């Protein structure tokens, strides 16, 4: 393998998840909330039927509480 090999996300035909769904979810669940736990975010993501790749990202968050901008940064969204 060479140093300039394409990252997996850059490979042709590799679809990127639709982060708009993530942003919409975060906007919805953080309405009136300052911080939410990883477990609460994950439960909401499952209930919202987010795609598997986005659920995997949420599941990989370390346990703890997050402000909307923190979780958006960690998950690749832009909510805030």
Image (cartoon, rainbow, N blue to C red):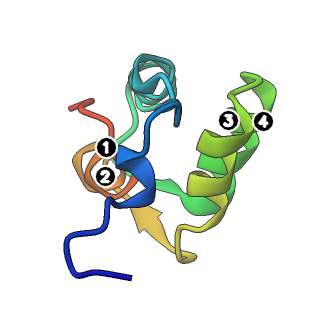
Where residue 11 appears, as percent x and y from the top left, is: 42, 45
From the viewer's perspective, is residue 56 above or below residue 22?
A: below
The local crowd at label 4, few if under 14, some if 14 to 19, many if 20 or more residues have their Cα within 10 Å, is: some
SS category of the residue bearing label 1: helix
The answer to whether the residue labelled 3 contacts the one labelled 1, judged by CB atoms less than 8 Å apart, is: no
The answer for how far apart the CA atoms under marks 2 and 3 are is: 16 Å
- Tell me if label 2 and label 1 are in contact, CB under 8 Å: yes
> Label 4 belongs to which residue?
46
Mark 4 / mark 2, whichever is N-terminal: 4
Residue at numbered disc 3: 45
Foreground mark, 2 or 3?
A: 3
Q: For the residues marked 2 and 1, what is the alpha-carbon distance in whole angstroms?
A: 4 Å
Percent from the top left, x then y, of residue 35?
A: 39, 52
Q: Residue 38 at x, y = what percent?
A: 58, 60
Residue hosting label 1: 68
From the viewer's perspective, is the residue at label 1 or at label 4 nearer?
A: 4
> What residue sits 32% from the left and 59% below the top?
6
Foreground tag (3 vs 1): 3
Label 4, label 2: how far apart the Cα atoms are? 19 Å
Residue 31 showing in the rendered view: no
Of the image marks 2 and 3, the number of the one nearer the N terminus = 3
Between marks 4 and 2 in the image, the one whose residue lies nearer the viewer: 4
Q: Which residue is mark 2?
A: 67
For the question of whether residue 8 can be seen, the reply is: yes
Assign a secondary structure to mark 4: helix
Quadrant for the C terminus, please.
Answer: top left
Instruction: Report if the CB atoms under discs 1 and 4 are less than 8 Å apart.
Output: no
């Amino acid at each position: 393998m060479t140093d300039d090999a394409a990252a997996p996300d850059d490979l042709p035909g590799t679809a990127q998840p639709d982060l708009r769904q993530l942003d919409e979810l975060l906007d919805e669940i953080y309405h009136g909330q300052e911080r939410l736990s990883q477990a609460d975010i994950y439960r909401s993501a499952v209930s919202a039927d987010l795609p598997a790749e986005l659920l995997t990202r949420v599941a990989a968050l370390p346990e703890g509480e997050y402000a909307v901008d923190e979780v958006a940064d960690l998950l690749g969204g832009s909510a805030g």
